[in-house]
Amino acid sequence: MKEVKVRNIGLDSITGSPILMLSEVDNEDFIYPIWIGVAEAEGIILAQSDVETPRPLTYDLIKNIIEALGATVERVAIVDYRNGAYIAELILRKENGEEIVIDARPSDAINIALRFGAPIFLDENVVKKVNIKDIKEELKDTKEEVEEETEEIKTVEELNKITEPETDEELEKFRQMLENLRPEDFAKKPEENKKEEK
């Protein structure tokens, strides 16, 4: 098992999905990319930015529940890959020393680990490793101008802006019209009622 840390959140230029970039604690040139959802990426960005929200968001609520039950997060680990999904474990330690292992998605486990300052581990045979230096060397050797596969995202606003789907102008006008509709717009006008009575 390798200890890793969150290096940054990138964006896959092909799928538009956020990518969680984990780097080895001992060697930051080794990156382990994991594709995650937008909400999970937002949670990680908020945790890394130390942004305080007026009310607890989901991961903050989970942290509060764990603490209220007299436990803490000892570590998280990405341990397997099955049916196209990574499998992680959230390892809790209760006050009496009892260890509890909870099955979790890596993005959720890491979000919770960040809020507890807990270490993150992964099985390097499970998650594919990428060497940043090798990639840079290959690009230098071929002397081709290659667009980067990912771009770094530092704020929730940047993530939302990049991952927002493109909207058709006509569709957007229709949506705005629907937003401005009121129930009384569908009521018959008095003149129409008189016509029907005749």
Image: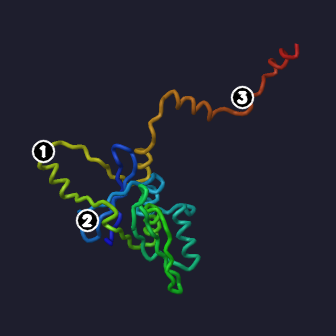
- Amino acid of disc 2: Glu
Image coordinates for residue 58, horizontal then vertical, percent: 54, 61
Q: CA distance from mark 3 to mark 1?
A: 64 Å
At 49% from the left edge and 76% from the top edge, which residue is drawn?
92
Q: Which mark is residue 95?
A: none
| Pointer 3 or 1: first along the chain | 1
Which residue in the protein does label 3 denote? 185
Q: Secondary structure at mark 2?
A: loop
Q: Nearer the viewer, residue 77 or 172?
A: 77
Q: CA distance from mark 2 to mark 1?
A: 25 Å
Disc 2 crowd rating (10 Å Cα; few below 14, some 14-19, many 20+) is some
| Pointer 3 or 2: first along the chain | 2
- Amino acid of disc 1: Lys
Describe residue 72's horizontal placement relative to residue 27 as left or right. Answer: right
Q: Which mark is residue 143?
A: 1
Disc 3 crowd rating (10 Å Cα; few below 14, some 14-19, many 20+) is few
